[in-house]
Amino acid sequence: MEEPEVEDDTKSNEDEVDVIDKEVWEHELDDEEFSMKRARASIQGIQKKDMFLNKLCPNDEEEEDPTVEQLPPVYPVHNSEQEWDQMAPVLGMKFTNPSELKHCLTNYAVKHGYDLWYEKNDKNRLLVKCCKGKEPTCPFRLWASWMQEERTFQIKNPKLTLRKMKDQISNTYNIIVSIGQCRNAKKFALSEIEVTLKEHYSRLWDYGTEIKRANPGSTVSMEVDNMPDGSTMFKRFYVCFRGVRDGWVEGCRRVIGIDGWFLKGICKGELLAAVGRDSNNHMFPIGWAVVTVENKETWKWFLDLLMDDIERGNGNGLTILSDGHKGLIEAIKERVPHAEHRLCARHILANFNTRFKGEHFMKPFWKAVKATTKQKHEAAMKEIKELDSRAFDYLMERDPKCYCRAFQVEGVFCDAIENGISESFNAKIVEARHKPIITMLEDIRVYVMQRLYYQRTKGESWDLTICPSIRKKIADLKDKQRFRAVYPCGYQQFEVVLCNDRYAVDLIRRTCGCRRWQLTGIPFVHGVAAISSMNLNSEDYVASCYSKLSVDTK
């Protein structure tokens, strides 16, 4: 077991996401994490002919054939019923739990006489190495942790950071290198795999043509600037796949989050994206574009193409969430004047905090933003005014109608007050934004393709009437409703009381005095209390956009 170890940059599935505001339940970040890289394993001959070691410890001298198409990985599943001497771990292999993997490794080590030991061994991860304290040392290591798209324990390739690379070179070759040298070496290695940036941009025309050939009905738009010397410079590139577009049109609410993020590679620019919400209240990417600069012109160009694709015209019946970028705000006013435009409350708060410091503003601010009735909103704003009249004036100048629930349009069935759904998408593609343009676009395409496939496959397996996240919400509301008194006052009409709060509930019209039912399409605690008083099923009163049928149409 003297084969060298190679660690790739495959992103681990174990990313943890901090949910800042648990009350904003519908904006939860996805617990889904799919690999954005294709398999790049190089196979070599090893003396012991061990395929597991072939994959984890490949020969650096052999090069991967760039002409061979790399397919998305299909991970094997461990068979616990096979004979003990036939058990062998494989990179990517999936296990029921850590104990099953350790049982497999024990049998594997006994058969081959390997001296394996556990450097990390807990319920969430395993790090296995070989020949502890022996010379010569063996570079073999195995890393495994839970997958987040499913409750499965999987063997993975850990990410090689620059600091780990520096330490590994120091230990292996007994030389001292700097972080900068490691960074340059890594860039050089990547340049051996990726074509030059200039070639990437020159191939964009062919890339767009291939998208339209392989995905008939998809939209691809590319523009360049003609320079005085006769050369052309990249300006912008837009893509919206037909399958993604049709899925949003047929199965998603008319709510879109729009945002832009800087590219992290050598060539600077911005990635723009439009992200919807599926029936389970998770993100549903629709279209994306690469531009050289984010301004009113580029946003208007992006919105023109997006509205044509989703057939929303001037935005009638559409709700758009975004940050406070001035160019975007002006572009939305001009291109989709009939759309409901909501600004992200967290961006409003971030700007507010630059002028008005102190935690004493936080509670009344969020009370004002989350209030679903104008009366409660005004009461919260009054608290802010009593603290500092200038703070009150500042928030009023930002127009509360754009970031407070009290002024949201009913029937949209989304009461989002922040654009977290776009940030969820950004978290999944952040690594891709470091790459050359075609590689980045391909990583995004593959990620979205895999995500939609897995989401649909999972949805088809649900034996449910409504989607799981909505069912969980209803279950939580059932626990809270028992503290409320329900008084009938008409045919399927009730007054629901808790202390001094009284709300009228109409089960036929599916309305509640607090407006949460009208805003979300889900009966809030008052509606659930009234429904439970009649021994009816609260799930039957949830809007159809949250049903499994909506998932099946995508």
Image (cartoon, rainbow, N blue to C red):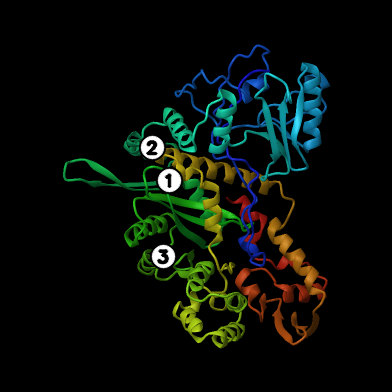
**Mark 3: few, some, or many residues within 10 Å (few <14, many ≥20)?**
some
Q: Amino acid at mark 3?
A: His
Mark closer to the observer (2, 3): 3
Looking at the image, can residue 511 be seen?
A: yes
Q: Residue furthest top?
A: 47
- Name the residue located 60 percent from the left edge and 81 percent from the top edge: 373
Q: Earlier in the sequence, mark 1 or mark 2?
A: 2
- Tell me whether circle 2 and circle 3 mark residues in contact (CB < 8 Å): no
Q: Describe residue 235's horizontal placement relative to residue 541 as left or right.
A: left
Element class at badge 3 = loop
Q: Where does residue 96 sit, x and y in percent of width and height?
A: 77, 37
Element class at badge 1 = loop
Q: Amino acid at mark 2?
A: Tyr
**Position above or below: 199 against 497:** above
**Residue 267, picture quadrant:** top left
Residue that numbered label 3 is attached to? 325
Residue that numbered label 1 is attached to? 218
**Mark 2: few, some, or many residues within 10 Å (few <14, many ≥20)?**
some
Q: Where does residue 265 sit, x and y in percent of width and height?
A: 41, 43
- Name the residue located 76 percent from the left edge and 66 percent from the top edge: 476
Residue that numbered label 2 is attached to? 207
Q: Of 88 and 524, which appears nearest the observer?
A: 88
- Name the residue located 59 percent from the left edge and 37 percent from the top edge: 159
Q: Where does residue 176 sit, x and y in percent of width and height?
A: 52, 30
CA separation in Å, label 1 and label 2: 13 Å
Q: Of 159 and 304, which appears nearest the observer?
A: 159
- Quadrant, the N terminus: top right
